[in-house]
Image (cartoon, grey):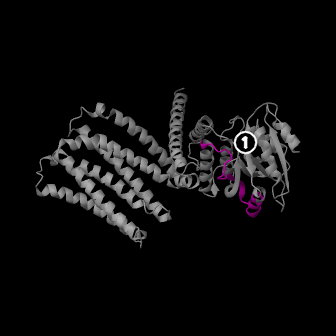
Amino acid sequence: MHKNPLVSIIIPAYNCSQFLSRCLDAIKSSDYPHYEIIVVDDASTDESPQIARQAGVRVVRMNKQSGPGAARNVGTQNARGDIYFFVDSDVVIHLNSLSCVVSKFLNNSEIGALFGSYDNQPSAINFFSQYKNLFHHFIHQTSYHNAHTFWAGCGAIRKEVFHKAGGFDAAQYPKPSIEDVELGLRIRKCGYKILLVKELQVKHLKKWSFYSLLYTDIFCRAVPWANLILQSQEMPKGLNFQKSHLVSALCVGLLIGLGIFFLLEYKLFSHIPIGSFYYYIKLSGVALFLGANFVVSYTRILQLWHKGRHLKFLLPLVFFIVSGFAFTLLTFFFFNQKLLACIPNTSFYYHLKFFILILFLLINFVIFYVKIPNIKTRSWHRNVMIRIVFIITAGMVVTLSGIASRSNLGYNLLPSAAALYFAFVLTTMNILLLNSQLYRFFFKLRGFKFLLLAIFSHVLYYLYSSGTFMVCWIIYSTKKLHMRQH
């Protein structure tokens, strides 16, 4: 590739008359002069082709609507450049976008493709547009540079790499879907690197509604993603497949399960006698669930602390609330059985029970205090807060355990209603902790009210994404089993 390669900018266009002029004007204002613009009109019914012709760019007309994948393939067939730069018609590139693309390819011959992200200033001002684009921006800006998928909203591919990989699979994806993601996987299999260029940012003009966001996420993204994973029998290392995302999706599923379990609790378990085999299974299940939640919370807190985020003042409070809930319930399940019910309140073993409980909390406190040296700060109010929270938490645990051990009221409260309530709180806290960077990003840019709506939308996103995958997995497994039988 020579020093000033020709860049073929390929724009699939379908009924985009409201955006196309701004898209083309931004390209013409670029600081890199060696480019050609090819607008592939996907059988539009509005004035999109006329707008492109009036702008003086090359227009290729499709005989029938075939989707953006097919349109981009047709664009490459009419392109003369060494680099194919795919830009959506509702995108406005920045002044230095083209020069950024060219410099990345010139500086690294191993890169077969690259892509950028939306910027943090979406054009549409309604909530769903802001949320969708800011979420996209955050995911791209916090992901690894070495990507495993491709994004064609603002992405470039070397000419020879594109043709070697076979282009977009227009037959499998005749409508806007994950045709760019699937192409990225094939590019990687060909041995080329895909670079996520975080400084390559573009403005998105599309206005999202709740319906369009939901429909796109489920039917244009989640369903094809699930089918791709199931067919390839591997989990792609995509932008949305970080461990925290997968655990968050699991936590959201657990929240739904907890709600259903809470509604059915008394009807399902009211007949189970205390001390029976099923009683211990029930308590063991809840204890394991709370223990797993505690481990997730504790691990995430340590990660946040070591990263030095501006949440340090709240972390001790969160830590002791989580540990207090967990140890309260686990200790209750361990001690409040018929085996210890006969112990007098004034006996040695009765006091030993509370001594062990307090010892658990003290050990936990010491581990937290010693393991993280940054907590030893000159800020006196933080140290005071830590000790106050510790005392309150320890007192709360002892009080609840005392109530539970002295009367049957303890059983009626803790294992059923309160246990599920605490489990719900722990799971919700885990979701907030696992996605704390994203939520802090929302809060910093748009404020508290936006954050509350964004958290609800994000939890809903995890819910329908994981639910869609489960439905697709059931359908796929059923079909596969049916094929084996025949």
For the point 71% across and 57% down, which residue is it? 111
- Give the quadrant of the C terminus: top right
Q: Residue furthest bottom?
A: 378
Q: In the picture provided, is 246 more to the left or to the right than 105?
A: left
- Give the quadrant of the N terminus: bottom right
Q: Nearer the viewer, residue 203 or 382?
A: 382
Instruction: Give the class, few, some or many, for how many residues have Cα within 10 Å of label 1's Cα (few <14, many ≥20).
Output: many
Q: Residue 33: x and y, percent? A: 85, 57
- In this rendering, is residue 289 above or below 195? above
Q: Amino acid at mark 1?
A: Phe
Q: Is residue 397 magenta?
A: no
Q: Which residues are magenta?
A: 100-127
For the point 32% across and 66% down, which residue is it? 366
Q: In the picture provided, is 164 more to the left or to the right than 344?
A: right
Q: Residue 129: x and y, percent? A: 63, 43
Q: Is residue 113 magenta?
A: yes
Q: Secondary structure at mark 1?
A: loop
Q: Nearer the viewer, residue 148 or 166?
A: 148
Q: In the picture provided, is 267 more to the left or to the right than 107?
A: left
Q: Residue 138: x and y, percent? A: 60, 53
Name the residue beneath numbered marker 1. Answer: 168
Q: Residue 115: x and y, percent? A: 69, 53
Q: Residue furthest top?
A: 486
